[in-house]
Amino acid sequence: MNKPLVVIFATIGLDAVGIGLIFPILPQLFADVTHSQNIALYIGIMTALYGLMQFVFAPVLGALSDTLGRRPVLLMSLAGTAINYVIMAFAPQLWMLFVGRAIAGLTSANAAVAAAYITDISAEDKRARRFGLFNAMFGIGFIIGPVLGGLLGDYGVRLPFIAAAVLNAGNLLLALFILPESRTPTRQKINLAALNPLRPMRWVLSMKGLLPVIFVFFIFSASGEVYGTCWALWGFDAFQWNGLWIGLSLGAFGICQTLVQIFLPGPATRLLGERGAVFAGISCACFALVIMAFATHGWVVFAIMPVFAMGSIGTPALQSLGTRQVDAASQGQFQGVLASAVSLASVIGPLAFSTFYFLVQKDWPGAIWLSVVVIYTIAIPLVFLGTRTARPGPAQV
């Protein structure tokens, strides 16, 4: 593997580590800073802020990389990430933590730039394999992040941020000396209208048959935000887990989900059909969530984890179903809309779930998982609506 790819894959892996790193330690960090135990809303706001910055700045960084080149944008992103972790490591006040996390959301939007870099330096017959490695690095980073955060957090709640700052600073130096520019910058004026993250939604509104599919995808994405927002709080409230056990549980889930995504979506679709695979995923997720809602011992969570991870087998099938309702000329737009739906879900989901958890935390923390079951139930009729045969609409000009 050539040196530029090593730097790019390290960048993506460290982004994922940074996302997962803070999940196990956020409750203790906010408790220390706010001197309060009712910190669910703070976690929701911070998680939503991170998603909002990604939503707004992903197209901006992508456009800047076309105009200025991939290398300077990636270097600025890595420097910003390292600075963010330094802020988080030493911030004595709540507003400083929010500023640091906002910077993290902005700089972590560099995934689009990294993907463009891989495209620039890869022949067409090598792109699929390299993008597979790209996704694998993100998955590995998200497994390592929570475990590392939980382990270091038990020795010092700020220690994970110091470790992340050192790792990202090292990656910055590596990129500075090794990473070449992958393309000739255009130096053209940026089209500001193209940077509007809500622009693709106008096309969706003109495609009535796609609305149920997009909404189900949004529901799946928003429901996924509950784990980053409430998992650590629930682990502590329900089982008195420390940072290490929270990290281990998140890491175990990451491993199970990675294995599911590698081995099961294809066979599930062949055996059950695409619609059947979506319903099977919803059923697995709901079964596991009900068990977790009533669990009184932590080992139950680890035991149900494989079934829980199988809830993700329906997402690829849903995406495939959606592509059948869009003509070939509009496939790129459709994928862009799905990405926008994921970004919007990462803003709305944390706020909604943290508010609900704040209301049930004292009496029954496990009720948060039943709220996800209710949301999945709403998605079932929408799957039927969204998988009917529909004529692909015209491409947007």
Image (cartoon, rainbow, N blue to C red):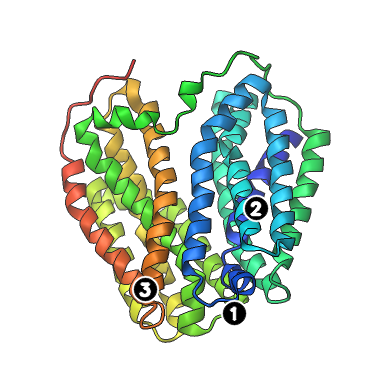
Q: Residue at x 39, y 28 (%)?
A: 199
Front residue of this view, candidates 118 and 216? 216
Residue sitting at 77 percent across and 42 percent down?
172
Q: In this view, does 237 lie to the left or right of 102?
A: left
Decide if residue 378 is on the left or right side of residue 52. Answer: left
Residue 177, position as x, y percentages in the image: 84, 35
In this view, the residue in front, 109 or 111, is 109
Say which quarter of the image contains residue 378: bottom left
Q: Percent position (x, y) of residue 60? A: 56, 30
- Horizontal arrangement in the rendering, residue 302 relative to residue 162 (left or right): left
Q: Mark 2 points at which residue?
A: 100
Indicate the amino acid at tag 2: Gly
Question: Which mark sits nearer the N-terminus, 3 or 1?
Answer: 1
Q: How far apart are marks 3 and 1 (CA)?
A: 23 Å
Q: Mark 1 points at which residue?
A: 242
Q: Residue at 21% across / 48% down in the picture?
A: 383
At label 1, the amino acid type is Asn
Q: In which quarter of the image is the C terminus?
A: top left
Whether residue 237 appears in this view of the structure is yes
Residue 354 drawn at (x, y percent): 42, 65
Residue at mark 3: 359
